[in-house]
Amino acid sequence: MRLFSELRDAFGVVAIFSIALMGCNDTIISGSGTNGASITVTGDGIISGAVQLDGLGPCEGLVVRLAGPALTTDVTTTAGGTFEVGGLVAGAYQIEIAADGYDTFNETIIYDAVEPLDAGQLILGVETVPVEGSVVLDDGQNPAGSAVALTGTASTEAPTGAVCSNASATVNLENNTALVDGNGNFEARVPRRSTGIRTRVERPGYTIEETPIADETIASASESAPANAGQITLYKLTGFVNIIEGPVHNDQTVTLQISAFNGVAEMALGEVTDTNSDSCGYGDWQDYDAEVSYTFGDNSQGDKTVC
């Protein structure tokens, strides 16, 4: 490298001198004196990579910003989403990529500038927003552990000025789930460009409830102002059983008439021989049917009750 400086002798004469130094990386540091003038640092290092947008693949025309020692530069991705920045020295470099509709990519790498560095595939995820809501059970029980799923459709498209492998993509939302906490609240996330979002809440022994969220509510949501799914109430599944053949004393297959309330979709049947017992050995869940055949499995004598 070559260092330039200036000295002033006792007679006010300016002496300019230079010292030539060679480094293993052929780094050049240049300046213009001792008055804080700008310094340019260049070397032989190269950082490259490729950029993809989730759902759209590699994209040409995205701006990649590389900031490091005495250097901040913007480069545009070429065909296949590739980029390359040369003239780099050793140090820490931050890579930043922003695209409309996607989360900003930020990553810091440490580069020794000895060999070219391939940063690999840099993938920007679809921008998401938070959705909050609450759940209550009509019988006053704690709703903690109730399962929440957000369903709907999300779409993506190439940002203005970018050319991607896929110009657009539409997917059905999956795995956008959450559990209700001990205070009855939940939070989940969905892509900002979502439509037809519905909040579905399930809990064994209770009705399944679904409520819609307006598209504009999702579009305007932010980290500080999540989309509000509102309060969702689940109702206890209830009903009663009537044995058509009358009371059962010994083993017998009977026909049951089953009435249910609150939108029952499934049922589980069991039996007790002690009518004063609150314990019931329920069988497997099955689709609700108003009339079914049931065979008691207890071989002991005595009155039996379906539960």
Image (cartoon, helix red, strand yellow):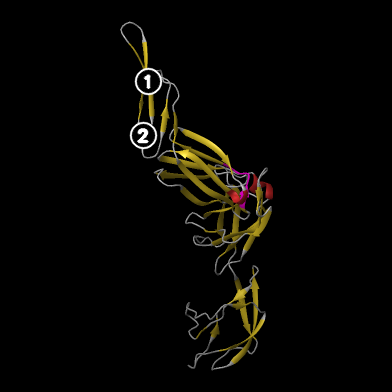
The location of residue 263, given as percent across then percent down, is 65, 69
Tag of residue 22? 2
Q: Position of residue 117 (x, y in %)?
A: 45, 48
Cα distance in 3D space between marks 1 and 2: 17 Å
- Is 62 covered by the magenta stretch? yes
Q: Quarter of the image holding residue 292? A: bottom right
Q: Magenta region's main secondary structure?
A: strand
Kind of residue indicated by mark 1: Ser
Q: Is residue 302 above or below residue 150?
A: below
Residue 168 in view (yes/no): yes
- Mark 1, residues whose alpha carbon is within 10 Å: few (<14), some, or many (≥20)? some
- Which element is circle 2 on? loop
Label 2 sits on what residue type?
A: Met
Res 63 quadrant in image: top right
Q: What stretch of residues is rendered in magenta?
A: 58-63
* Label of residue 5 in the image: 1
Residue 12 within the magenta-colored segment of the rendering: no
The nearer-to-camera label among 1 and 2 is: 2
Q: Is residue 24 left or right of residue 85?
A: left
**Nearest the camera: 298 or 217?**
217
Given residues 133 and 176, the one toward you in this image is 176
> Could one spot residue 126 in this view of the protein?
no
Residue at 47 percent across and 34 percent down: it is: 71
Is the residue under label 2 in contact with that under label 1 (CB below 8 Å)?
Answer: no
* Callout 2 crowding tier (Cα within 10 Å): few <14, some 14–19, many ≥20: few
Seen in the picture, residue 7 relative to 177 is either above or below; the reply is above
